[in-house]
Image (spheres, rainbow, N blue to C red):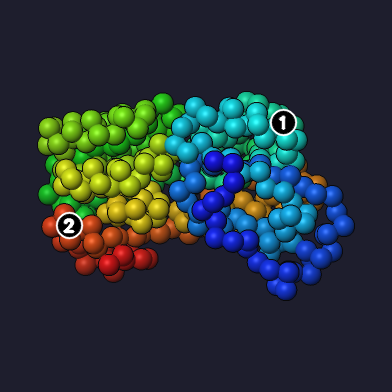
Amino acid sequence: MRRRDFIKGIVGSAAAWPLMARAQQSERMRRIGILETSSADAASYNAFLEAMNALGYIEGRNIVIEYRSAEGLGEQFPKLVADLLRLNVDLIVTRGTRAVIAAKSATTSVPIVMAAMAEPLIVVASFAHPGANVTGMSSYATELEAKRVEVLKEMVPNAKRIAGLYDMGNPYSQGLWYEQQKAAQTLGVQTELLDIRKPEDIGPAFEIASHHSIDAILVAVDALTQEHRKLIAEFAIQHRLPAIYASREYVEAGGLIAYGPSYPDLYRHAASYVDKIFKGENPGDLPIEQPTKFELIVNLRTANVLGLPVPTSLLARADEVIE
């Protein structure tokens, strides 16, 4: 996807421009490349634009946004990065492990800001001093997988076997699988890996889960599952499998429950990195931050379809309940 058909209008208006924006109109136009896993999460991208607007960066006046989405096909990232670099972007904002790896492999000079990255140490020297041309936000996705196992067990207390629906071709999935196994062992639950690499793998994975008497499932957040989140939610309901996800767009598409960082909040913080870099700071000197806002979202409609009572303890802790 080259432009944002899913964005509802231009963020902000001339009447609401911050004073800073007016001061920056005389500055040179900055070109920002956006490298997304999927256009599914419009809320996060809107949050980024709103934060940029508040910092004085107005699309069409002092910044140009070059939006590129892999639309669930992780192998597209190198081509998308090359396209952005041909346009001489001043900075690239990425989401996801494969996006930042592709960007870092393609350039050592263009700054890269990670809006969300599960395992930053795959591409940086340390959280405190990332080094090179990469910085940004950790989504803390791997570390939270153990918590998702606990929430899923709370939702389905009789679960004896759980599975992870992961694309093991994604470098960060090894960490997810390790965390799931460790947490499941603590809870006395058996685990199974359902490895999906392409859309055609999703249906058969649920068939395997059904035949192997899986009681509940964890779904990784990545390009493939984001793009096909509605299909995954439908398969989960069809096979009567309670599933937990890592971000809200899955629950909005019909998924049962999600626990993870607020991705719009991560994108707002990413805008502050862009501002600092445009003002002359070295990305390699900007420490990587971890999320501070987390969300527990429950879809009661899906729970009712599954005939699954939601524990009052979960409802009491939920940040949002879809009814």
Q: Is residue 270 left or right of residue 166?
A: right
Residue 306's place in the image compared with 130, above or below, is below
SS for callout 1: helix
Q: What residue is rendered at 44% in x and 37% in y? A: 72
SS for callout 2: helix
Q: Which mark is residue 86?
A: 1
Q: Position of residue 195 (x, y in %)?
A: 31, 29
Residue sticking out furthest to the front: 5
Q: Which residue is mark 2?
A: 305
Q: What residue is rendered at 58% in x and 27% in y? A: 78
Q: Residues within 10 Å of mark 1 (few under 14, many from 20)?
A: few
Q: Would residue 185 be visible to someone looking at this image?
A: no
Question: Callout 1, which amino acid?
Answer: Arg
Q: Position of residue 207 (x, y in %)?
A: 18, 33
Q: Which mark is residue 307?
A: none
Q: Is residue 97 left or right of residue 29?
A: left
- Disc 2 to disc 1, how far (Cα)? 49 Å
Number of residue marks: 2
Q: Would residue 223 be visible to someone looking at this image?
A: yes
Q: Nearer the viewer, residue 187 or 97?
A: 97
Residue 20's place in the image compared with 131, above or below, is below
Q: Position of residue 158 (x, y in %)?
A: 12, 49
Q: Position of residue 241 (x, y in %)?
A: 19, 45
Residue 229: quarter of image: top left
